[in-house]
Amino acid sequence: IELQIASFMESVTSDVEGRQEAAVKKGVKDAKAQIQLRGRFGTLNTPALSNFIRNLENKPITRAYASAGQEAVKTAENVIFAGIAQGLNPRSIKTGVMDALQINEHAALVIARDNMVGTQRQAMIETFKANGDLVVGYRRLCAKQLRTCPLCLALDGEFIKDNEDFRKHPQCRCTVIAVFDEDEPVFSRTGQE
């Protein structure tokens, strides 16, 4: 996995550096309006990147878009990998996925979101499990918006033990938060309410 990560990093390094330089310039220009952007992250989200690489072994993009060609699929994977490495929103990379696979905006966003959100969420779950001496499980947290699916709203606030699976669906935007005490009250109103 580390060799695959290194290979992806080589292919996106100049793009990452260019985006970092552009971000720094924009940050200086908009410092007063965007005071919360005081710096940049110094480390990669290695667990999320590792999850993405592991998921590539299942070849979901290749299976769905084999007709686009191997080079197109590889380009889309690199776009997604760079997005995860840079902590970007799936919407910001959808154009790269669209261009690579020659697909419509909706399909590109589904691919970007499922790969990016899913790998981030799985990395958090693995971190919680690795800290089982402190974390007893986790809670599902969904966006309480009009476009949130009814299933996610119904499961919002659900306590999930370390040995249970996280139930998800395509385009699931739910995230998870650590729970340190199973009797800990839910932090806010849930989607059920």
Image: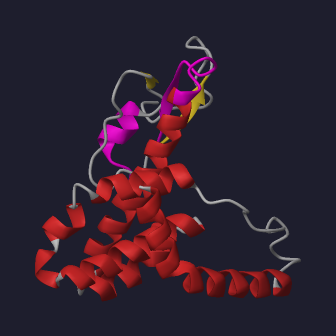
Percent across and percent down for residue 117 are 44, 55
Percent across and percent down for residue 147 are 38, 56
- Within the image, what quadrant is residue 132 found in? top right
Any magenta on residue 122?
Answer: no
Identify the residue shown where x is 14% and y is 66%. Answer: 63
| For residue 122, side relative to residue 172 (left or right) | right
Number of numbered tags placed on the structure image: 0
- Within the image, what quadrant is residue 25 found in? bottom right
Percent across and percent down for residue 58 are 22, 55
Any magenta on residue 143?
Answer: yes
Vertical order, 51 against 115 (above or below): above
Identify the residue shown where x is 68% and y is 80%. Answer: 20
Q: Would residue 146 be seen by someone viewing this image from the given angle?
A: no
| For residue 175, side relative to residue 167 (left or right) | right
Identify the residue shown where x is 45% and y is 72%. Answer: 8
Q: Which residue lies furthest to the left in this view?
A: 67
The colour scheme of the drawn protein is secondary structure
Q: Would residue 116 be seen by someone viewing this image from the given angle?
A: yes
| For residue 181, side relative to residue 91 (left or right) | right
Q: Residue furthest top?
A: 183
Looking at the picture, tell me which residue is in the foreground, 129 or 88: 129
Q: Residue furthest front?
A: 3
Looking at the picture, tell me which residue is in the foreground, 192 or 27: 27
Looking at the picture, tell me which residue is in the foreground, 30 or 147: 30
Percent across and percent down for residue 99 are 32, 88
Identify the residue shown where x is 23% and y is 67%. Answer: 61
Could you tell me which quadrant the N terminus lies in?
bottom left
Magenta region, residue range: 130-155
